[in-house]
Image (cartoon, grey):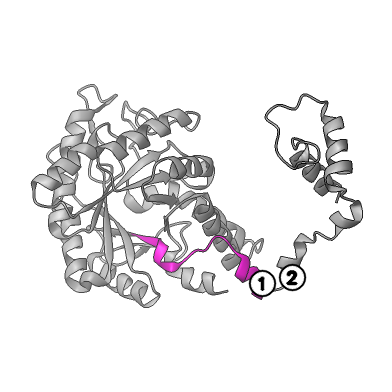
Amino acid sequence: MLRTVAALAACMAGRDGGTGHVTMCDRRPAASRHTVSLAINFQLSETALSSLDLRRLRQNEHVRALTREVHVQLDQLIQPLFVAEAITHPEPVPGLTGVHQESSESLLRQVERDLKAGVTKFLLFGVPRARAERQIDWSFTASQVRALKARFGRDIWLATDVCLCSSTPHGHCGVLNAEGDHLDNDASVAELVQAALAYAQAGADCVAPSDMMDGRVGAIRTALDGAGLERTILMSYAVKFHSTLYGPFRLAADSAPKSGAALKDRASYQLDPARPNDAWLCAERDAAEGADILMVKPGLPYLDLLRELSRAIRKPWAVYHVSGEFAALEALVAQGLADRAALHREILIAFRRAGASMIITYGARFACDWLAT
């Protein structure tokens, strides 16, 4: 109650005596302003303030449901899918409960199960058998897009990740220079454009460049429009940080930088967690270059940026609830330290509250049950 008194006193401190109007400049000492406001203007007492019972709207499930301001719906969730050319049966991804690296055949069966669970939106990651430094063959992933759309048509919305990391022998997200210590930006963008075109021509509803090369959004948008694919949506991983939270994903996509390379990690092209201004620059640039949807990745450590950016840049915002985050929650559940449905539901609400229009999560296929409880 004392906090309530102090808060109300602070709100009233700038009001002109007797009139209730806010003064532009009140140079009285703060204590004097509070005293006059409380004693003269409103004659508030502790008895009156104690009747402001904020718990009244929390007392049962009915009123809590009526007064909620943030809602998570199943149709706001996107389920990642991994398909590998070199395997013949599904292989579980460590740390990601219910997520597998799929074969071409099992991929179709998994999507059929997901549809029955109410999931209709997917983000596809292809893992081809062959790898190349340049002139990469994108036909495997394109063939999976084609098969999915042939089988499910408009029943699904299919985005396809556009990156080089699963297709190069070194595991980096672009084309290495001759010294092997830096990514050649222009050569990388040229490869990304070809990947995006191949996936869009195969029927992808959306292409999603995740590489963090400069200028790739504009180049891909120009190429799509020039090929008569102006209806293809472009979702940019605009704000993608150099993070330690990608471990299970890199196993699923076989995309970790390989040992022995001169370029040890992705810090020279992914964002530094301590440089929020760089995140703003990337988001503003990608929006200007034609991205339809912008993304923050990872999610939980960067909710501050998601909130600020989604308010400032009036585009739909996605957040990627990345594999390390998801695995950490599942580890809590496995130790009996949290209720699974309540834990995941709380995190999904946090993403929506911060401004996400859509959430990429490995738990989309379980969310129907989580959101119903």
Query: Would you say 6 lies left or right of 318 here?
Result: right
Give the residue at x 42% y 34%. 279
Over which residues does the magenta segment extend? 62-80
Residue 47 or 242: which is nearer the viewer? 47
Estimate how packed mark 1 is, as few (under 14), some (14 to 19) or many (20 or more) residues with alpha carbons within 10 Å. Answer: few
Query: Would you say 293 lies left or right of 305 here?
Result: left
The residue wearing badge 2 is 59
- Residue 291 badge: none
Dividing the image into 4 quarters, which one contains the C terminus?
Answer: bottom right
**Residue 151 drawn above or below residue 164:** below
Give the residue at x 40% y 66%. 75
Instruction: Determine which quarter of the picture holds residue 101.
Output: bottom left
Label 1 to label 2, Cα distance in Å?
A: 7 Å
Residue 210 or 282: which is nearer the viewer? 282
Extreme residue toward the left, this view: 227
Give the residue at x 87% y 50%. 44
Query: Would you say 241 lies left or right of 67 here?
Result: left
Task: Pinpoint residue 3: horizontal percent, then vertical percent.
Answer: 82, 46
Task: Pinpoint residue 9: horizontal percent, then vertical percent.
Answer: 81, 41
Query: Dots 1 and 2: beta carbons under 8 Å?
Result: yes
Q: Is residue 132 visible?
A: no
Q: Kindly state the secondary structure of the residue where label 1 is placed.
A: helix
**Residue 211 drawn above or below residue 328:** above
Estimate how packed mark 2 is, as few (under 14), some (14 to 19) or many (20 or more) residues with alpha carbons within 10 Å. Answer: few
Q: Kindly state the secondary structure of the residue where label 2 is placed.
A: loop
Amino acid type, callout 2: Gln
Residue 76 or 23: which is nearer the viewer? 23
Extreme residue toward the top, this view: 179
Q: Is residue 63 magenta?
A: yes
The residue wearing badge 1 is 63
Task: Pinpoint residue 98: horizontal percent, then vertical percent.
Answer: 44, 66
